[in-house]
Every structure is written in C-alpha cells, then in structure tokens.
Image: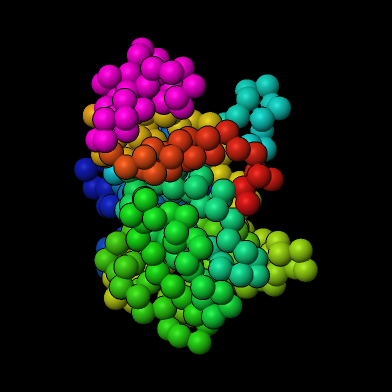
Amino acid sequence: MRPRHEDAVEGFVVAVDRGRYTCVVGEGRTVVAMRARELGRRGVVVGDRVQIVGDVSGRADTLARIVRIDERTSTLMRTADDVENALEGRQERVVVANAEQLVIVSALSDPPPRTGFIDRCLVAAYDADIEPLLCLTKADLAGPEEVLDYYAELDLPYVLCRPEQEPTELLEALTDRVSVLVGHSGVGKSTLVNRLVPGTDRAVGVVSAVGKGRHTSTSAVALPLPAGGWIIDTPGIRSFGLAHVSPDSLLHGFSDLVEATTRCSPNCDHTGAGGDCGLDKLIAEGGADPRRLASYRRLLASRSGEPEDQQ
C-alpha cells in the first residue's frame, strides 16, 4: 500500500533540469525536488501541480520529493519528429501541463510569418482544448492584414506588438491566466518575455540573413506575471509534430461543424476524398460557411506536414 503523504504540500513546477524540478510552494517559496520512485514512469513537466514532501524550506542544498502529480486540466502535446526513424517510431512529448492559453508568436517581417507553423500550433491548441491567441510582433515593419485575412474564418483573437510600445494589450490577455508562448526563433518571443516580466533576462538572439533566428531559449520555464498569472516560455522550435492528433479531436475547434459528422460514413476522415462526408452535406445545404470547412481541412492537412514545409 502506497503512503498517503498527508503532510504533502502543493507545488507548481516552474522549471525542469536533468531530473531536478524547481517548484513554487506557498506564497512564492522556491523548492527543488526530485521525482519519487513511486511515481513510476509518469513524467513531470513545467506547469504540473504536484504534491511535495520532505524539506520544503527552500534553503540551499535541500532536496524534496514529488510524490503525486495532480490531475491535469490540459496537456499540450507535440509529436517528436526527430525520432521518426527510431525503433519505437515517433514519440509524443508533453510540452507543458495545465495551460489555459496558447500564445502563438509570429513576426510580421524579418522573418516573415509562416502560416504553416501557425496552422500546426492551432491544431495543437484545439486538440488540447486550450484557447489560442495570435501575437503578431514587429508590427512596425509590416501590416497584419494578409495574415488576419488568412484566418478570418477562424475568429482567431490576436494582438499586435511594436518595439516602441509597451505590450499592454498582450499583458491584459495574459494576466491571471496560465499561458504558454510558442514561436520560431527570431520572432521576438524572448524580447516580449523580458518586457512582460522585468528582470527575467531571457537570452535574445539575432535573425540571420536567411530569416532563421538561432535558438535563444533552451528550456521551458514558467514565469510569474507582475499582476498575476504565469507565462511559460518555451524554446524556439522549428517543428510541431501532430501525428497524435485525430481528425475528430481537431474538429473540437469548429463547434459549428461538429454535429454534421453524425451523418458521416463509418471511419470517415473528413477530408472529403471518400465522397460521403457529412461536412460536405452540411455545406451543400447551406448550414455552415464553406470557408470554415476549408479552414478545417487546411489544418487537417497540416497535421502531416514536414517541418521544412511550415512556411
């Protein structure tokens, strides 16, 4: 029988480094902990709410133990494309736990926006039942009209950020929530984090001549916002593998289309290639905007896109 650990205190995992987990407990005290053997192979990730026993004083050179992982309200996943040829095939990896909002950071210029990457982030958000927010940086260099028109039928919320202005609108959207920031290197994500949480000093890189910034952040970390809430900054990534996302799971982001799938043939993949998809019937009857179906199928197709194609 496993111990009940009735003396355990609740912690929030803010960083993970080589088997050591930095957690915030109580009124902001920082505790370093290891994973208890009784957890088995269950992984602990940034954003997890956990139960901790042992020395939770936070003093230097002390080490507590994580004995339980609380049930997650959301799990943002990505399929690791880099192990595609491994014996075990592609692996699903948890990016963060318990996020309420996925902030997709994209520059409007230098580097130009990559709608393929944004599409794949949206798929991941819808699959995890996390609200997406599009954050368009470098709005002083180019207008947002083309990008916003591309996503017009998704009713996607967005904010614009300019280097000469404080990111007030973004901060309002983040306050009192747990948000995770994702974006290609070079789009200004680390610069935003440094402005949102003064004193953070996240490394800021430069964009090369070919428009690909070098990776500037190396590990996910949760940072407390001055007015409440957390932002989880993630490393600059070039791919967001989605092999684990099913067509039906993605459809959760399109509530106006969901009911029509009850008229689909068994095992319908909703691409329309089989010729008997309930979504096509819905559009033919005028029950939904055809552009909504086109957007869904574009995201559906992006699930199998390769990293190089995320332009």
Q: Nearer the viewer, residue 227 or 152?
A: 152
In this rendering, would 63 be left or right of 74?
A: right
Q: Main secondary structure of the magenta part?
A: loop
Q: Position of residue 249 (x, y in %)?
A: 37, 32
Is residue 295 placed above or below 158 in the rendered structure? above
Q: Nearer the viewer, residue 237 or 203?
A: 237
Whether 1 is among the magenta residues is no
- Residue found at the very far bottom of the displayed protein: 164
Q: Position of residue 271 (x, y in %)?
A: 46, 27
In this rendering, would 194 be left or right of 247?
A: right
Does any portion of residue 305 appear in the rendered image?
yes
Is residue 284 placed above or below 274 in the rendered structure? below
Q: Residue at x 56, y 44 (%)?
A: 240
Q: How is the image coloured?
A: rainbow
Whether 282 is among the magenta residues is yes
**Rendered-image quadrant of the N terminus:** top left
- Residue found at the very far top of the displayed protein: 266
Q: Position of residue 83 (x, y in %)?
A: 66, 33
Magenta segment = 260-287
Q: Residue at x 27, y 19 (%)?
A: 263
Q: Residue at x 53, y 31 (%)?
A: 243
Q: Position of residue 128 (x, y in %)?
A: 37, 41
Is residue 12 placed above or below 124 in the rendered structure? below
Q: Nearer the viewer, residue 212 or 97?
A: 212
Q: Nearer the viewer, residue 65 or 142?
A: 142
In this rendering, would 104 be left or right of 90?
A: left
